[in-house]
Image: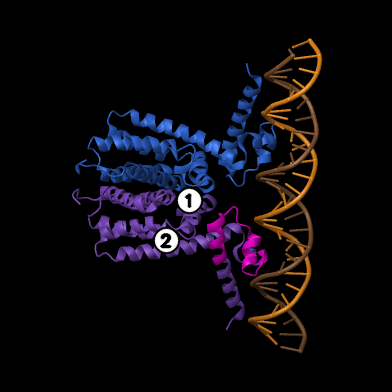
Chain colours: A blue, B purple, C orange, D brown
Amino acid sequence: MNKRAEKMAENRAKLISAARKAFAEKGYAAASMDDLTSTVGLTRGALYHNFGDKRGLLAAVVDQIDSEMALYAQKAGAETGDDWQGLLAEGTAYIEMALDPEIQRIVLLDGPAVLGDPSQWPSQNSCLQATIQIVEKLISQGIMKTVDAEAAARLLNGAALNAALWVAASPTPEEVLPLAVEAFQALASGLLNQPAR
Amino acid sequence: MNKRAEKMAENRAKLISAARKAFAEKGYAAASMDDLTSTVGLTRGALYHNFGDKRGLLAAVVDQIDSEMALYAQKAGAETGDDWQGLLAEGTAYIEMALDPEIQRIVLLDGPAVLGDPSQWPSQNSCLQATIQIVEKLISQGIMKTVDAEAAARLLNGAALNAALWVAASPTPEEVLPLAVEAFQALASGLLNQPAR
DNA sequence: AGTGTTGACATACGAGCCGTATGCGAAATA
DNA sequence: TATTTCGCATACGGCTCGTATGTCAACACT
C-alpha cells in the first residue's frame, strides 16, 4: 500500500473541490490561492507542486466538470430511443446544465478566457466529442443533411450554450427556458434532410 | 471652444486605442495599466479619472468594437435585397469578423468573463439588437416560424460566434470557414416556415 | 532494523499590479 | 486679475502570484 501516493491523491481532490467552490463563487481572477489552500488545511506549496500554477488548477477543475457534463448529457440522450430525439435531448440537457452557476462561471466564462478555445483543451471537451459522434451517425443514416459533422456539432453546442447564458441571466429563468428550448429545436430541425419534421 | 473637454476626449480616445492593442495582444488580465498608459504618455491617474477602473476601460473598448461590428454586419445584411438572405449574410459576417484576433480575445473571451453575460452589457450588444429586429420582421412576414425573437437571435448569434472561435483556432482557417458557413446556413433554415428553401 | 534518499509539502522572499488618497498646475470663470 | 475648478500626476498600502529554499515523513536498500 502506497501511503504516499494515497495522501497525494487525497490532497489533489481536496484542492480541486475547494477550487470548484471558490472559482464558482468569486470567479477565477478574484479567487485567492492563499485562501483556497488554507480552507482545506494546506498551503500554496501543495498547489504549485500538484498543478504547476493557478491555470493548472483551473484546467483540472474544468476537466472534472466537463466529464460530469458529458456523462449527464449522454444519459439524457440515451433515454430516448431515437437518435435524432437523442441529439435534441442532449442539446436541451446542455441548456439546462448551464443554468448551474458553477458551470456558467467556470466552464462558460472563465474557462475560455483563461484556457483559450475549448476545442483545444487537454480535456478535449467531452461534451463536444459526444455530440460529434451522434451527428456522424445521423448523417450516415441519411437523417441529417451532409454537412461537416464537427461544424454542426459546434454550432449546436454553441447555440445551446449561448441560450443557457441568456436564460440564466434572465430575471425569470423559468419563463424563458421553454422559449430557448423551443427555438433550439426549431433551429436544429434545419439540419434534417426531410423538411417535414 | 472648450479646450479642456477637447483634450479630455482626445486622451480618452488615446487610452481606448492603446487598450484595444494591449488587451488584444496580452489579454485583459495580463495587460498592465502602467504600461498601457505610459505608451500614450499618460499615467494611471488619467485612466482612473476617465474610466473608474480597469473594468471600465474594458467596457469602453468593448462598446466601441461592438458598435463597429454591428455597423459592418448590418451593411453586409443590407446589401442583399432579401430579408432572409440578409439574416444569413449577417450571421456569415459575424463568423468572418470573429476571425479577427482582437475581436476574439476582447469581445468573445475576456469580455464575457470580466463583464458578465453580453446581454446585460451597458452597450446593450448592438449586434444582437440588430439581429432581433430582422428576426421580428421575418416572423411578422410569416417567413420564419413563430418562435421567440430574442431566443432565435441569441441562438443564431451564439452559433455563429462559436463557429468563429472554432474556425479561428483551426490550423487551416481558410478550409474550415466554408464548412462553418454551410452548416450555419443549414441550421438557420430550420427557422424557416417553408421547409423547401 | 537501521540508514540514506526521495519527494510532497511548508515557509520565506521578491516583484508586480491595482485602487485610493493626495498634490499640482493649467484652464475656465467672474 | 483673482479665484475656483478639475483633469491628471504622484505617492502609498495592500494583495497576489510564482520561485527558491527548508523540512520531515515515507520509502528503499542492506
Quadrant assignment, res A196: top left
- Image quarter (top left, top right, bottom left or bottom right) of the N terminus of chain B: bottom right
Chain of residue at mark 1: B
SS under mark 2 = helix
Q: Is there any visible trace of residue B49 in the rendered image?
A: no
In 3D space, how far apart are the residues under numbered discs 1 and 2 (Cα atoms)? Answer: 14 Å
Q: Which residue is tagged 1?
A: B117
Residue type pointed to by label 2: Ser
Between discs 1 and 2, the one toward the N terminus = 1
Amino acid type at circle 1 is Asp
Q: Is residue B130 left or right of residue B44?
A: left
Magenta residues, start to end:
B16-45
Which residue shows up at 36% across the image and 60% down it?
B130
Q: Classify residue A26 by image quadrant.
A: top right
Give yes or no for residue B19 being in the magenta stretch: yes
Q: Secondary structure at mark 1?
A: loop
Image mark 2: chain = B
Task: Give how far across and how far down residue B60 sits, in percent.
Answer: 53, 62
Front one among A42 and A88:
A42
Of A7 and A174, nearer the camera is A7
Q: Are marks 1 and 2 in contact (CB under 8 Å)?
A: no
Residue A152 spot, x, y in % from top left: 33, 44
Is residue A155 among the parts visible in the rendering?
A: yes
How many C-alpha atoms fall within 10 Å of the one at disc 2: few (<14), some, or many (≥20)? Answer: some
Please state the horizontal and vertical placement of residue A79, each as a whole percent of the image: 33, 28
The answer to whether A19 is drawn above or below residue B179 in the figure is above
User: Going 26% across and 50% down the picture, which residue do you hit?
Assistant: B189
Residue for badge 2:
B126
Asked if residue A104 is among those painted magenta in the image, a careful observer would answer no
